[in-house]
Amino acid sequence: MVQNVIIRVMRVLFPQHARVRLVVLCLVLTAPGGLCAATVELPLSLRTRILQNALQESLTPGPDRKAVLYEKDSHNFFRIADPLLSIRDGEPRFRCDIAAGAGFPSLKVLPSAIHWNGSIEMNLFFYVDDQWQLRYRIIDSTIYDKDGNQPLLSSFVWKLARRFLYPLLEDFSFDLSPPRGEILELLRNSVSPEDMEELEAALSTIRVGTLRADDDGIVVPLLLTVADQPTPPAVLPPQEPLSLEEIQHVQNLFEPLDAFLVFVVKSAGADFSDPQLRDQLFDLLITSRYRLLAILAGENPVAGDDPLRNLFVEAWGQLREIIESSEDQDALVQEQLLRYMTFVNAGDALLALDAAAPQLGMHITTDGLRRLARMLQPEYKEDPLRFDWEVDPALRNLLNFLPAPQPDSSLMTLGSRLLDLLVPAAHAAAIPGVAPAEAGRRLDGWIPSDAELDEYRTLVALLLEQAARDRTGSEELEPRYAEIYRHLVPATALIESCWRQFTRSNGQVVCVRSQSGSLGMMQINQHVWRGFYDIERLKRDVTYNITAGTEILMRYFKDNGIKVAGAGGRPEYAARAAYCAYNAGPRAARRFLNPKATSREKMVDDRLWEYYRGIAGGGAVDLRTCSVGAPPEIISPPPGPPSGPPAVQPDKPLFRRSADHS
């Protein structure tokens, strides 16, 4: 049974962070029958930078990092400067500069004095006392002169160091009570009332194991003893698609987790200025949301009664890696470093205990997420898990999205009418005098009949063309990539919705919507892009929907598409990679090159490529069959991954399934 616990622990945490170690031991208790218990280690990691800052502030609180420890007169003194805590070869060390002086009466009337400058280095032993204070004990020390050599004359320096510096170091302590308390409270907030008694019994056994040091800092193992009970049999995931009620249930479960991730992304994004880190935070947030869509679409079966646990585990592993690996940590003040230290350790402890002792019934609860979020911003007055569908300008700005477009007035001004007539957009000659703004207004609420499809198609083509040109005009793209993107936009709209924004339901005109919440012509998913776009405008405003879709597509085109194209040496791969990301998230960008992709994924990717080649070759879009007519010259596909099965017929539900992931 203990082996099962070890395996669960390693699978959950060990691949995510090399420093995390969990030890589970079988202890024979004196109770009748010799019960077996497990000792679970929750590692509390203290980065060297945090300990260094605390020690500096204690010994040399001034901005110049100097301190006078003793000064009798100008000849008798002991001063230190620039204290440094480091870890070398798994051992903590301390060093600082020293200036010392000793005066004594000479044979003459005038006094004589010795002034000495150099440094001292000490080997330390860390331990935690019974008040949860991390302390240092000096094992040995070495004195060096200003040239880095061990001086012959240093006895008076030794005496001054032992008298004035040693006691300061050995009296110094770092309080572990706050992070320990936060960890315990998070665990209490993550268990059901019926399991609270068993959890409290485990928490009452908390103690400190043997401390260890690595290149990053000191690890303080918090040990708990839990009863080793049989692991319940695994619950097989359901194979049938989720019902509407089940979809709503999963969505409701996801809301607190998504709000938590948004709060953490905004908090970390505000504290860390590194653009690469912000890109990683964007990837974290969007990827977690695409994972939810895979559940809603029935592609990732829901296991057990906690379907979002795996989403949290995966998101947490990525989040802690982003925070821990950030070089921006050097720019944070001590208070911020302590917050992130507590935040990371508490989350690790929750997952460690959940993995090692499933019988305790640990869950990713709303109260637990709220407690974890407040560790980053204890002074935050509102609910950090507040969930709504409003546009979040701070989130957009943080993750480098342009300001959201403002809604057009329902009534055109005389000036705008004249402007539309005098400055028509490119290719607007197909419908004389119609500019994109007017085309958008004419398309709003329009469900075209067969007789109206040609006019409808022309208006949509005008909007898509202008939106693509506007987007490439605001970006610095090579001409070849700008052309690829302009062909990709109408191809994406065709595979997502067959260029439709509206449909009819129960006699009412409604927005085209997938089962998982993808909306309108570009099928912008309301869950993935919550906070980035106005959900109601995505439903009713075709121009806004297209604008949002082209913005998302351009981001994937630049961040993923061009990179894949450059690596493969084929510019046209930019279109395929960008759409794969648009369809299933940034981590799916290379899906079209994967021979192990599912048959459905291959069908979607091949169909997009078919549409793209047709449009790029001058083929006409046929909205009656949702296809592209043969271009004047057939373009041979470039060498690439093996083709998927034959494309499905246009009346098959391929487009709806594709839209589920946008």
Image: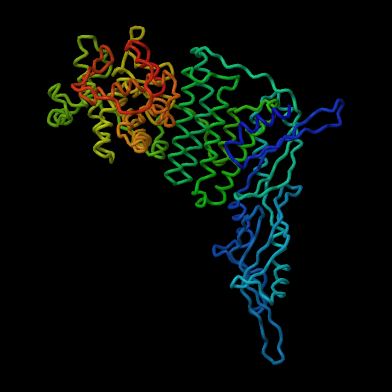
Relative to 103, 569 lies left or right: left
In terms of image quadrants, where is residue 71? bottom right
> From where the camera sits, is residue 130 visible?
yes
Quarter of the rendering occupied by the C terminus:
top left
588 lies above or below 233: below
In terms of image quadrants, where is residue 566? top left
Residue at x 67% of width, y 41% of height: 180
Quarter of the rendering occupied by the N terminus:
top right
586 lies above or below 329: above
Relative to 370, 559 lies left or right: left
Relative to 282, 229 lies left or right: right
Q: Position of residue 384 (x, y in %)?
A: 52, 34
Relative to 332, 559 lies left or right: left
Q: Position of residue 361 (x, y in %)?
A: 67, 25
> From where the camera sits, is residue 529 visible?
no
Is 490 or 573 nearer to us in this picture?
A: 573
The furthest residue to the top? 506
Residue at x 60% of width, y 60% of height: 84
Q: Position of residue 403 (x, y in %)?
A: 33, 36
Q: Position of residue 539 (x, y in %)?
A: 34, 21
